[in-house]
Amino acid sequence: MNEELINQPYLTPNEVAQQMMVSPVTVRGWALKGILQAEVTPGGHRRFRREEVARFARQWNPAGKKGPLRVLIVDDDRALAGYLKELLDDGKDRCVVETAHDGFEAGRKVHSFAPDILLLDYMMPGIKGSEVCRQIKQLPGHADVRVIAMSGYITPDIETEMLAAGAECCMAKPVDVSRLLQIMHLEA
């Protein structure tokens, strides 16, 4: 990041998105929901105080939490779910990982397991990941669960649908492991 940007008191949605490794649409959604405070310029553009972005980043940064990160993997592909569980449950006590293989099981485990992050497949039998995401985000006490969507068939429409439902980003399958770990703040 260049020196000029570091000394700016305000950031644009694109700058916040780059810093948080999400899309600008996600940043605008956070502002609309009131979870990331924005100020509006006379021209109608959102600007974010650097201190507010730092506060928000700490809130979303699992490293600031006590105890290991709680991750729920929701995917009907049991082999992929098992692979991700093994990847994240690496013996370093950074994560506690559970899996669910459909939306119904995901709903039950959200209540009993209380995850910090959901790795959520878009295409599952019976219910789409966007509906699972929407329902989980509406549960009292679960609006702040981070949802990282995954799909083997990502299209702009699917990405828009998942972001509108509350996902912070969408990843194509096969999952780029280094990007996933970076998004989860678990990079080696």
Image: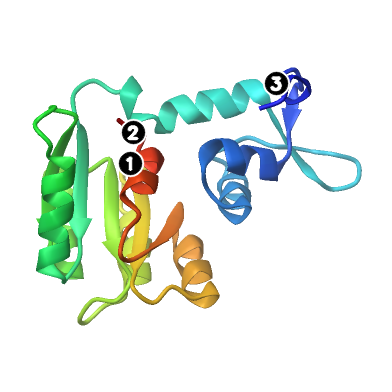
Q: CA distance from mark 1 to mark 2?
A: 5 Å
Can residue 143 be seen here? The reply is no
Image height check: is 24 above or below 187? below
**Which residue sits at x=35%, y=47%?**
180
Residues tagged 1 and 3 counted as in contact (Cβ below 8 A): no
What x and y, as percent, mark residue 64?
A: 34, 21
Q: Position of residue 92 (x, y in %)?
A: 13, 27
Q: Is residue 74 above or below residue 29?
A: below
- The disc placed on residue 187 is 2
User: Mark 1 vs mark 2: which is more N-terminal?
Assistant: 1
Mark 2 belongs to which amino acid?
Glu
Mark linked to residue 181? 1
Kindly identify the amino acid type of the residue bearing the numbered disc 1.
Leu
SS of the residue under disc 1: helix
Q: Position of residue 36 (x, y in %)?
A: 58, 37
Model colouring: rainbow
In the rendered view, tell whether residue 95 sits above or below residue 120.
above
Between discs 3 and 2, the one toward the N terminus: 3
In the displayed image of the protein, which residue is found farthest to the bottom? 126
Residue topped by disc 3: 6
On the picture, is 8 further left or further right than 148?
right
Task: Please tell me which residue is depicted at 61% across the width and 56% down the height of the picture.
Answer: 25
The residue lying toward the viewer, choosing from 47 and 183, is 183
CB atoms of marks 1 and 2 within 8 Å = yes
Quadrant of image for the N terminus: top right
Label 2 neighbour load within 10 Å: few <14, some 14-19, many 20+: few
Whether residue 38 is visible here, answered yes or no, is: yes
Q: On the rendered structure, is 23 left or right of 163?
A: right
The amino acid type of the residue labelled 3 equals Ile
How far across and how far down the image is residue 27, in percent?
A: 59, 47
Label 2 sits on a secondary structure element that is loop
| Residue drawn at 49 percent across, 61 percent down | 163
